[in-house]
Amino acid sequence: MFMARNLYNWKQINNSNMIKQYIKQAIRLLRENKLLSVISIFGTALAICMIMVIIILYVVKTAPFRPETNRSRTYYFTSILSKGKADNRRMSYGAIGIPYIKACILPLKSAEIVTIVSRDDRNKPMASTMDGLNIYSAVISQTDDVFWRLFDFDFIDGKAFTAADVKSEIKNAIISETVARKLFGTTHCTGKQIKLDFLNYRVAGVVRDVSRFADKAWADIWVPYTTMDSYKNSYEEGINGSMKCYVLLKKGYTRDDMHKEVLRLQAVYNATLKDFKADIGYQPRSQTEQNISGDNEKETNMSRMYIRYGIVLFVLLLVPVLNLSGITLSRMRRRMPELGVRRAYGATKWNILWQVLNENLVYTLIGGVIGLAFSYVAMFMLKDWLLMSSLGQAGITLGMFSWLVFAIAFFFCLLLNLLSAGIPAWRVSRNNITDSINS
Amino acid sequence: MIKSILIQLWNERKSVILIWVELLVVSVLMWYLADALYLQYKQYTSPVGINIDHVYHVQLGTVPAGSADYDTTTVHGSEGGSDILIAYDRIAHNPNVSVACFTMTIAFPYMWNNRFATFKRDTIIRNGFVRYVQPSYYRVFRVMEAGGGSPEVLEKAAMENNCIVTANVAKDFFGSAKKASHKQLAITDQGTVDSVMCNIGAVCNLMRYNEFDEYNYVYYKPIKIDEIRTVNADAVGWLPIFIRVKASADNSSFAENFRHDMAQQLRVGNIYLKDVIPMSYYRNEMLREKVEQAKGYITVIFFFLINVLLGIVGTFWFRTQQRHSEMGLRMAMGASRYSIFGSLLGEGLLLLATAMVPAIFIIFNMAKLDVMQITPIPVALSGRIIFAFLFTLGVEAAMILIGISFPAWKAMHLQPADVLHEE
């Protein structure tokens, strides 16, 4: 009778007060053994930090953020192979020529937006004021009007160039905030003239700076591609050239639809050529595929890359888990008598298991919060050491402080807790009551 | 002594098993990472075939036809080739420049631009690259002749309109560099159908794209100055110029000063001086990914080490606390304080030693399954094994030493009387 009532009480208390009780107890235990608390919290923090740095980098490279807000639907054509028509000999592999784009990519029915972009990061022209006094060596993106629809830029002043500008080769330039300040000392400079090497452009708009993580949208200055002669260069009967295409997939179509469509158009185009034929390969690529393969010719092996990520995360979790379980187990051993008493008073195995997991979760969460903070600090401090190419000079934007990142961090905390406290909790909950009390 | 520690560890296996497993896992991973680092270091230190100290890329540009500054007179508008040569001469005659050369973009060192070439003789076929360079290229990049001869030997051979091949081409087709001299080799360049017989003038050292790449089969063809005279000024875009600067004149502000001094002189027709870039810039750009990877490995090793340290401190802290009475008893029976410290440390090191045995077994099997890193240039296996073994063992032992010292130091200052009293 007594036992039955007690069990009933346990269940009721369990729901509300017990969790509070566990937390209180956990904090008390924290203070009791400072060194061990520091070790387990620091161990958790380190593990979470390491994992979060990897996750944050993955997220910023693939998840959408301004101005690349359409990443999930954006697909990329960045390179093309030209071959000899008769003997399939390899001619050239590189960026795409305008004639091919006009024949095979612009007419795609599965595409909502097709923007043409050419940017040479190694060759930085001089942007200067007309008097030549203020100079900025700028990365130029040659593009078109729909670029500004695909990417969501934040215009501080003026507005984007139009289809008419592109068609009529009007020298209108959009400049970044940094360039505007460098050249004119202000961000309100629409209508002013600048020189790009030897060509005069009118500033049509000023946009807020873009993180280098937004690798496709990023540049210092954007101009209509028709205003620079290099776009006319095409080789191998128009297959190769200097352009890339970023395409927004129309709703209701899949990547495969687009791939098949481009192959169809390509076959028609190839039929018109005399000596060469084009091979677009496995393109278009999604954001993730593009991030892994870049402009590589081979098909992206996604499953292999997820397995690799999985193994790395597993290993980075495994070592701290072993570590923390060892410490938790030792700690639990010392509390055997206490847990034995609880069992003697009617707590079930599950109650004990639950208590240990809950208490441990407090440590894990404290460690998790510190770890997440660490990971941001690490991203700032180690950007030159660890992440130099991805971050470039630009540093980190707010784009990565997303709920997704917090949610993933919390998930890994739970996982870490379950793994590291699971074994000890299971072992102590199974212990014989009399043995526990006697120990 | 060792036997008694082993027995003790075995009896307390339940409390040390997790730290033992951790040491095992960390040993395997550390071995893998240390091996990868060693391989990369070996790749990095093998010769690349060129020397880029004091070498700069002088980038010329052309005024676009749409500019108000564009010179439309025929001589500059359609036959800018001689303007390129004038600019080149002015660069080469700068007192700070020891030697200058043209190449084509497909021969731009530390860039991925290339043009394939297929080498054929009898039944042997090799795939490699063709590179067009002016004969002075060998002096600019200090390319050595395979037999140890100076760059001038190669330059002389190239001036006689011969091809220069790399040592691996000579070895595969003719057996050695010496035998290859003045022999003929059929080569098909990418984009062409027919192969051309090429007269080998000299053999140069092995070449590769960068410090982490494999050695390529390469042949060099000379660019002749007369051919440049007839081209359009736009050709400067695919005719990069490189200069070797006198060591005494080279310093961090050289590029800026050179640009400042030469800007006027190099404004010829529609040509202007765009930029002067040290070759180290291109090298860093190309190696960036590999350097990052190496840094990533080091970071992960560091992360594991801190974990090992935490685990060791935590485990041994508890163990010594729980065994106070045992230690008090041992001291009372005449054990010195140092022997207590020593036995705790011995426990840690034995734990590591016993974990290393299965770790080596796992590594051996990983190697059999080809999971270990592979490199373009082979590295001796014995060196790899010795380095990885010593690194793993040494660093982990150091961590154990640090981790155990603190609890052991506290244990050795116990008062036997107090402890036994508690008991």
Image (cartoon, rainbow, N blue to C red):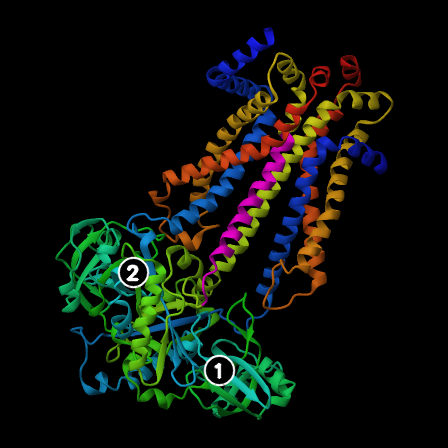
Residue A27 located left or right of residue A344: left
| Residue ID at (73%, 52%) | B361
Q: Which residues are magenta?
A: A298-327
Callout 2 crowding tier (Cα within 10 Å): few <14, some 14–19, many ≥20: many
Q: Is residue A312 covered in magenta?
A: yes
Query: Percent position (x, y) of residue A438?
Result: 73, 15
Query: Percent position (x, y) of residue B121?
Result: 57, 89
Q: Is residue B319 covered in magenta?
A: no
Residue A247: image tag: 2
Q: Nearer the viewer, residue A72 or A10?
A: A10
Residue B117: image tag: 1
| Residue ID at (14%, 69%) | A168
| Residue ID at (55%, 49%) | A311
Q: Dividing the picture into quarters, in which one does residue B315 lie?
A: top right
Q: Chain of mark 2?
A: A
Q: Amino acid at mark 1?
A: Ala
Magenta: predominant secondary structure element? helix
Name the quadrant of the N terminus of chain B: top right
